[in-house]
Image (cartoon, rainbow, N blue to C red):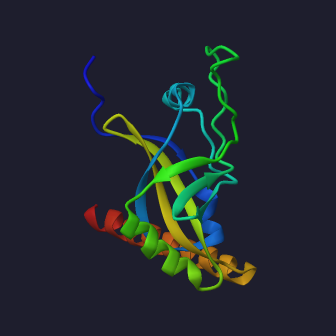
Amino acid sequence: MPREKGERMIARNRRATHDYSIGERLEAGIVLTGTEVKSLRDGRASLADAFATIDDGEVWLHQANIPEYSMGSWRRSHTALRKRKLLLHRQEIARLERQLASSGRTLVPLAMYFKDGRAKVELAVGTGRREWDKRQAIRERDMNREAQRELADRTRRGRR
């Protein structure tokens, strides 16, 4: 069977861009069991409450929900919310540790996807937003959207 090519999105953490100001992004591999991969190929995963930590020079993904594979046996199946090891180079982990040393920063998973048949997680260093920051970001987004609509409307009127 030929190897899968390209990227295929499994799950996206939409809440992360609302709750955090996103800084540097990077891609990490993820260590999975067989039934976890099968469950991901079915498109079943959630990053809603997920976060990542660095413990003893290793990066771990916590609270990422990969439901049990429906066709798997009870002996071979996995735990849905277990912590999973992420694969990064030592230099990348050291750089992340330096960035996370300043207060208010956390390691947030933004997306989980297959890239050329291998499961990947997109991580970002995020700084938590306060409530007024969130409201201001929503206000700016709405203003930009309204400006784009107005511009599109003007160009449409100009063609007639």
Task: Return the residue found at the far right.
Answer: 131
Depth check, front residue: 141 or 129: 129
Q: Which residue is painted at 27% across and 27% down in the image?
A: 3
Point out the image quarter for the N terminus: top left
Depth check, front residue: 56 or 91: 56
Q: Which residue is painted at 43% across and 75% down in the image?
A: 95
Q: Residue 60 falls in which quadrant of the image?
A: bottom right
In the rendered image, the vertical position of residue 119 relative to residue 88, given as above or below:
above
Point out the image quarter for the C terminus: bottom left
Residue 145, position as x, y percentages in the image: 50, 69
Total numbered labels: 0
Residue 134, position as x, y percentages in the image: 67, 76
Residue 33, position as x, y percentages in the image: 54, 31
Q: Residue 140 falls in which quadrant of the image?
A: bottom right
Q: Residue 136 falls in which quadrant of the image?
A: bottom right
In the rendered image, the vertical position of residue 33 relative to residue 128, given as above or below:
above
Q: Which residue is painted at 60% across and 38% down in the image?
A: 45
In the rendered image, the vertical position of residue 3 relative to residue 110, given as above or below:
above
Can you see residue 54? yes
| For residue 141, side relative to residue 81 (left or right) | left
